[in-house]
Each structure stands twice: as structure tokens, then as C-alpha cells.
Image (spheres, grey):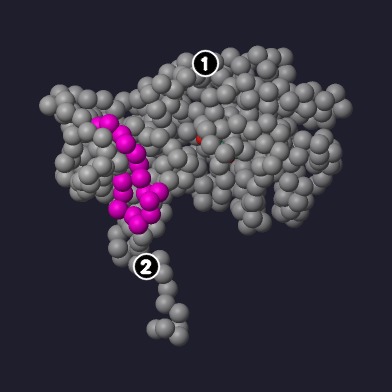
């Protein structure tokens, strides 16, 4: 469930008319709902147990307003770069609630994380373990770590977001996990606390998650039996959201309760602190991309609705063939529908938000909302085609604030430098 709905025929974000935002901020623009973010965080936390650590995956949506909204509820942050750690800290998330994941953390990033005193680094390879050990020991520190293990069980809404398979680059191999754990337990500069796993994103196949978690449980028990310290189990993120009507679960409550129950069953009596890294399920349908119809390109056999948002603003359809529902901002009074291809202005055929989609009849100047764009939307955007990064707006009841203004052409041009020989 979310807080975008029609009031007197106009689409609202909580108590704010989207047409007002379009008028004041322009289009395209991302619009986020505080109430939806807050609800999803609370439902997730309740589902996995109040004692669990919930580290929101910043990569899904790193907007400062979004992070601050979650920080106020006590959320931690799962980060994958120095930039994300800095963003989380700037949002008021204390270092003691930040974890750092990723297969390619640079020496500088590791040093930054150690200096910042973050809660945990999820180590993904033996060479990273060696590098981190050296970096922390040189600073006289002992960094808390967990070992991310590849469980050889992948799942996800698309091959490109499946991470737990044996062929995927993530984590140490299953067969090496025990040896590396023992090695880490005897190394300077690190304090090994447990294991981490993350098998993919946009997952509805909870049986795959369960199978991976059962493997992790077995490994924790094995490590404990050897007298090794194993007090933390980070179960990653990955819970899917319904982008399309007819998904197996109603958004939020049902799927998360099923997920929480499964986790409880698998981890019963294990005596570890559980950690989670949800991204999409928190932010996914807490945001939409508001865009304006520029032109209608009518062909004999096809109608293209050309909008002012493009694949650089929301890359999911182009990159993952992802489906997003499209809602008109003003409900049609006539009830007439048409079949459209909804496309952006970029010179790539993949710059298409929807193909052969039945929508109310629309014309140039009309506003539409590309729904469920709160996760992996703005955070994956670029300036491709020298287009300006779009603004982001956070709504709270009847108020809204621009939490990221539209980039300016001066800022865009200011990114480049002229080589001496061309000056
Ligand atoms: C290590 C890790 N944790 C958490 C996440 C968040 O996943 P999701 O947004 O599907 O919950 C990701 C996403 O790719 C990830 O790589």
C-alpha cells in the first residue's frame, strides 16, 4: 500500500496535488511520500522482530530527505561506497548503525569506514580481508566484520539483479567460507562477528531465500561448534515489490509477514543478532516519477506518447525490461482509452517506459505518473544526452519540499575541464 491516490479526480501524494508540484518544480520530477516510507520501514521492522537490526540499503534511494525520514525511525544504513557512508552520516545515521558491503571497496574507502567507526564491514573476498586487516591494524583499530558468503543459490526479478548464484561475483565461495572464517578469527585489525548473505533483488520466491538462510544457519552452527565467535547473521535485502497489478502478494504487510515468519522459523534458537538490508521494499512504491506528455506521434498502427522523462532519469525499463504502472494525474472524465507506447526523448529504442499500454486518452501537456519509481530510480539516473539530473521532492502530509533541486546547465557544464592544448 502507498499514499498516492485520487482526490476529486486528481492524483495526490498524501495531501499534495501532483499538478501543483509539477507547476512549481517543473517536470520531470521524482515525488516521494514520507508516510509510505515510514509505513514500510515500520512494517518491515515489525515483521523481522524489533530486536533485529534494519540497515536500509542506501543504493535504492540515497536522497537525504529519504534517509533522514528513515533515520528518525531508528533505521541503520547498508552502504556500498564512501559516498553512501557520507550520505548516511549526513542524514544523522550514527556510525554504529552503518554497514559497508560491496565486492570492490577501495583502500581509501576501507580506511574511511574504519576511521568513521562503522558497525560492520561485510568482507567479500580473501584479498579484501587482507587489505582491511592491514588498514585497520596500521591505525591501531580492530574493525568488526562479517564474511559475505555466496550460498550458490540465486534468485531475483531479473538475471541482472540475481547475486547469490555460484557464477555471480558476490561473496566468498561456499567451499572456502570456513577456512576464511578461521583465518579472519586469527588476523590483526579485524574482529569477525558472523556471516552475511544477499542472493538477489525483487525476490518473491521465498523458498530460495529460505534455502539460502538454512545454509547460513548450518554454517553458523558449524562455526560455533568449533568454538569460533559467531554472533551476527546479516540476511541482506531482496524482498520484491509489486510493480504490476496481479503480483503474488499485496504490497507490504502480507509478503513481509510471510518473510518474517520464514526468517523466524529458520533462525529459531540460533542465538545470533539478525541484520537485514532492505532497499526496494522500503522505497519502491514510496516514489513516482512525474512527467509531462510532450507530443503524440500517431502512426497508422501505433501511437507514441513522447514524455519529458527519459531512460537517463529512470533506467529500469531499459535495463531490466521492468514494468511500471502509469497513472494519469487527472482522471479521464470521458472514460475513453487508447493503446500507447510511452517513450522518452532519447535516441535509443530502449528509451521506452511502456509498450502497447492501455491508458486513458492523453494529449500534449497532460501529466502522467510512472509509479513505483522510488527505488533504483533517481539513484541510478545519469546525465546521458547531457540532460539535467531531475529534482526530487519529499511530501509530508500537506507540505512538500524540494530535497534535490534540478541540476542547472552551469553545474552540468562545470563538471568538465578543458585540456591545456585545447584552451
Ligand atoms: C548487499 C546488498 N544488500 C542489500 C541490497 C538491497 O536489495 P533490495 O533493494 O532488493 O532490498 C542489495 C541490492 O542489490 C545488495 O547488493
The quadrant where residue 210 appears: top right
The residue segment tinted magenta is: 343-359
Residue at image coords 31%, 46%: 343
Which residue sits furthest left? 334
Is 216 displayed left or right of 326 in the figure? Answer: right
Q: Is residue 357 magenta?
A: yes
Which residue sits furthest bottom? 421
Residue at image coords 23%, 46%: 299
Does 350 sit above or below residue 53?
A: below
Observer able to see residue 398: no
Compare marks 1 and 2 and give the one earlier in the sequence.
Answer: 1
- Find numbered disc 1 in the image and state the secondary structure of the residue it sits on: helix
Task: Return the residue nearer the eye: 160 or 145.
Answer: 160
- Position of residue 219 measured from the top left corner of the image (x, y, whole percent): 78, 27
- Find numbered disc 2 in the image and state the secondary structure of the residue it sits on: loop
Label ID, residue 244: none
Q: CA distance from mark 1 to mark 2?
A: 48 Å
Residue at image coords 16%, 28%: 336
Ligand 1: which quarter? top right
Is 290 displayed left or right of 81 in the figure? Answer: left
Does 297 sit above or below residue 151?
A: below
Question: Is the N terminus in the top left, top right, bottom left or bottom right quadrant?
Answer: top left
- Position of residue 57 measured from the top left corner of the image (x, y, whole percent): 52, 37
Packing grade of label 1 (10 A; few <14, some 14-19, many >=20) is some
Instruction: List the residue tagged with mark 1.
Output: 257
- Position of residue 330 measured from the top left corner of the image (x, y, whole percent): 18, 32
Q: Is residue 404 magenta?
A: no
Observer able to see residue 59: yes
Image depth: mark 1 or mark 2 in front: 1
Residue at image coords 59%, 22%: 206
Instruction: List the residue tagged with mark 2.
Output: 414
Amino acid at each position: 500500500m502507498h499514499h498516492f491516490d485520487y482526490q476529486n479526480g486528481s492524483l495526490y501524494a498524501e495531501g499534495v496535488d501532483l499538478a501543483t508540484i509539477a507547476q512549481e518544480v517543473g517536470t520531470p520530477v521524482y515525488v516521494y511520500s514520507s508516510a509510505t516510507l515510514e509505513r514500510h520501514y515500520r512494517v518491515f521492522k515489525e515483521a523481522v522482530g524489533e530486536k533485529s537490526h534494519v540497515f536500509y540499503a542506501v543504493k535504492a534511494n540515497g536522497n537525504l530527505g529519504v534517509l533522514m525520514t528513515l533515520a528518525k525511525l531508528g533505521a541503520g544504513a547498508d552502504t556500498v561506497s564512501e559516498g553512501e557512508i557520507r550520505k548516511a552520516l549526513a542524514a544523522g545515521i550514527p556510525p554504529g548503525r552503518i554497514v559497508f558491503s560491496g565486492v570492490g571497496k577501495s583502500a581509501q574507502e576501507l580506511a574511511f569506514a574504519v576511521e568513521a567507526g562503522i558497525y560492520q564491514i561485510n568482507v567479500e573476498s580473501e584479498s579484501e580481508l587482507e587489505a582491511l586487516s592491514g588498514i585497520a591494524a596500521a591505525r591501531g583499530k580492530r574493525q568488526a566484520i562479517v564474511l559475505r558468503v555466496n550460498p550458490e543459490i540465486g534468485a531475483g526479478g531479473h538475471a541482472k539483479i540475481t547475486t547469490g548464484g555460484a557464477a555471480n561475483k558476490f561473496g566468498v565461495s561456499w567451499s572456502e567460507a570456513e577456512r576464511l572464517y578461521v583465518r579472519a578469527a586469527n588476523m590483526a585489525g579485524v574482529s569477525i562477528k558472523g556471516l552475511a548473505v544477499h542472493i538477489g533483488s525483487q525476490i518473491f520466491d521465498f523458498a530460495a531465500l529460505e534455502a539460502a538462510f538454512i545454509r547460513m544457519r548450518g554454517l553458523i552452527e558449524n562455526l560455533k561448534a568449533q568454538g569460533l565467535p559467531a554472533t551476527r547473521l546479516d540476511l541482506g535485502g531482496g524482498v520484491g515489490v509489486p510493480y504490476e497489478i496481479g503480483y503474488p502478494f499485496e504490497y507490504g504487510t502480507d509478503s513481509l509477514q510471510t518473510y518474517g515468519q520464514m526468517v523466524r522459523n529458520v533462525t529459531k534458537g540460533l542465538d545470533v543478532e539478525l541484520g537485514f538490508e532492505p532497499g526496494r521494499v522500503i522505497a519502491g512504491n514510496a516514489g513516482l516519477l512525474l512527467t509531462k506528455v510532450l507530443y503524440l506521434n500517431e502512426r497508422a498502427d501505433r501511437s507514441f506518447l513522447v514524455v519529458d522523462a527519459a531512460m537517463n532519469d529512470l533506467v529500469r525499463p531499459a535495463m531490466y525490461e521492468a514494468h511500471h504502472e502509469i497513472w494519469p494525474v487527472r482522471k479521464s472524465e470521458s472514460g475513453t482509452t487508447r493503446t500507447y507506447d510511452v517513450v522518452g526523448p532519447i535516441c535509443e529504442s530502449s528509451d521506452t517506459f511502456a509498450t502497447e499500454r492501455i491508458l486513458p486518452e492523453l494529449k500534449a501537456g497532460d501529466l502522467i505518473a510512472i509509479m513505483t519509481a522510488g527505488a533504483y530510480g533517481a539513484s541510478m539516473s545519469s546525465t546521458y544526452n547531457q540532460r539535467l539530473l531531475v529534482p526530487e521532492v519529499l511530501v509530508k502530509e500537506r507540505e512538500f519540499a524540494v530535497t534535490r533541486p534540478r541540476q542547472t546547465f552551469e553545474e552540468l557544464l562545470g563538471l568538465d575541464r578543458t585540456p591545456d592544448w585545447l584552451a
